[in-house]
Structures are given as structure tokens and as C-alpha cells.
Amino acid sequence: MSYTAEISRSNPSCFLFLIDQSGSMADPFGGPGGKRKADGVADVVNRLLQNLVIKCAKSEGVRDYYHVGVIGYGARVGPALGGALAGREMIPISEIANNPVRIEERVRKMDDGAGGIVEQTVKFPIWLDPVAQGGTAMVQTLTQARTIIEGWLTQYPNCFPPIVIHITDGESTDGNPTDAANALKALASNDGQTLLFNIHISSQRTNPLEFPPGADGLPDDYARSLFAMSSELPSYMQEIAQQEGYPVTADTRGFVFNADMVALIRFLDIGTRPSNLR
């Protein structure tokens, strides 16, 4: 299967984000930075949504090359974006661009071009707020993702395959998620199978792993289970990852463990960079 279908407004692709919002996401992140996991994940997802909007921005406006869904799971399982987008499962990127919940001002450190660092205030749109309550209903969430992707593929059978990105910090509380993950990955367009990538953020202070070719070095069964659930990188993503300096192989999977926030943005950028955008 090729992963080469042209992405256009008449044949868009989709991204579906599954965000762990359980109570343990209030714990500090074990990797570099030490902030609350829920806060870090919300920042990363908001940054990525902004990047996707920018990718689709043309002189006449934002083109709907992508439709995007964000499902949260914790006290409840369901759509996680707020404001005018609340309750919706799959949303054209132009509507996301036009409907942030609010715009915040953030301070960003930048190179001043003379060897120093300066602080600059930037506008930062917020679509997803941090939440940390309830259990980790991973099986229910992956099953709901399968239903959403099935509906998408019925509407766009020739699309570039859907990409599902799952961000979690731990163990499923509603059973073994392997079968649900495999059922999701088995769904396919005429261009290839659905891709499932997993980001495991932990409170453990262990070395980060990005795009590992195997489960060696992962600290526990939860991480190894998420690795096994992750799709192997298609060849075009392997090439992108190699260009970014990752030593990937044909066995490399879309999985990271305890990477810092900068590395998570880089991972998500690679994972959301289809090969044939028109």
C-alpha cells in the first residue's frame, strides 16, 4: 500500500487525536521540563493545530486539505475542543482556524541574530484546555476512534490514509486495548491502512526514546504494549525522519516515550506531514 494519494480539497485527509485526560495527567511530566502532563499535552496539541492551519493557509484563506478530530478520555469519552467547536468529532481545518476558544499572549525566547537570546511576545491560539480527571478508558476510546474513522472512509474511500495520534500516560482501566487498536489499524482507504501512532508520557525519570525499532529499553509493560500497538512508519515518513536525524529502519514504529515537549512537536510534525499535498 502506497501512501501516495493526492491530498486536495476534494479528497482531503484526516487526523484524529486521542488525548488521555485522566486524573494521573495532573502529575508532573517525568521528562525534561517537569510541568503537569495535562498542561504540556494541551500546549503541544494547540501548537500542532496552529501548525496544521498554517500548512493549509493560502492567499485566499485556509484550504480544507485536512479534517481534524480531538477526542479526550477521562471522566468522559468524547470530543475535547471547546467553544464553537464543542461536541464535534471531525472538523474541517478552516473551521478550526476560525474558531479558537481564545487567543493568549505567550513569551517565546528567540535568537537575536548576534549570539544572544531575546524574549518576544507572540499570539497563541487555544482550542484545547488541560483536563485531568477520571479513569483511562483506552478501549472505549480506540473503539470510538474506529467508528469515527469508518465513517470518514465511507465518505472519502480514496483518501490519503487517516492518521490517529494517541497521547497517554499509562495503563488502560477498561481492559486490554490491543484488539481495539488492531481493529482501528485494519481500516483502510484505497491508498493504505490507517496509521496509529502512540506518545507515552510518563512520570518516570527515564531516558526518552523516539522512533525506536524495537521494545528494548522500554521500562514497563505499559510502554511495551503501546509500542506494539503502534504502526510501522511508511517509507515516506522514514525518509522525513532520516532527514531530521533519526536513525530509523524499516522496523521503526510511530512511538515515543518521555520525549521533551520540543521533541514531541517534532514527532507530531513528522507524523502529520503527508507526502502529497496539493
Image: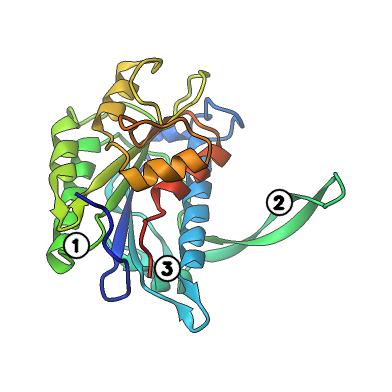
Q: Is residue 99 left or right of residue 235?
A: right
Report which quarter residue 276 is drawn in: bottom left
Q: Nearer the viewer, residue 107 or 181?
A: 181
Q: Position of residue 28 (x, y in %)?
A: 53, 29
Q: Which residue is mark 1?
A: 152
Specify which label sits upstream in the sequence, 2 or 1: 2
Whether residues under marks 3 and 2 lie with C-beta atoms below 8 angstroms apart, the answer is: no
Q: Is residue 59 left or right of residue 212?
A: right
- Badge 2 amino acid: Arg
Q: State the residue at coordinates (28%, 35%).
A: 230
Residue 131: tell me if it is visible.
Answer: no
Q: Which residue is mark 2?
A: 108
Question: Which label belongs to residue 96?
Answer: 3
Q: Is residue 6 left or right of residue 123?
A: left
Q: Secondary structure at mark 2?
A: strand
Q: State the residue at coordinates (53%, 54%).
A: 47
Q: Nearer the viewer, residue 5 or 137?
A: 5
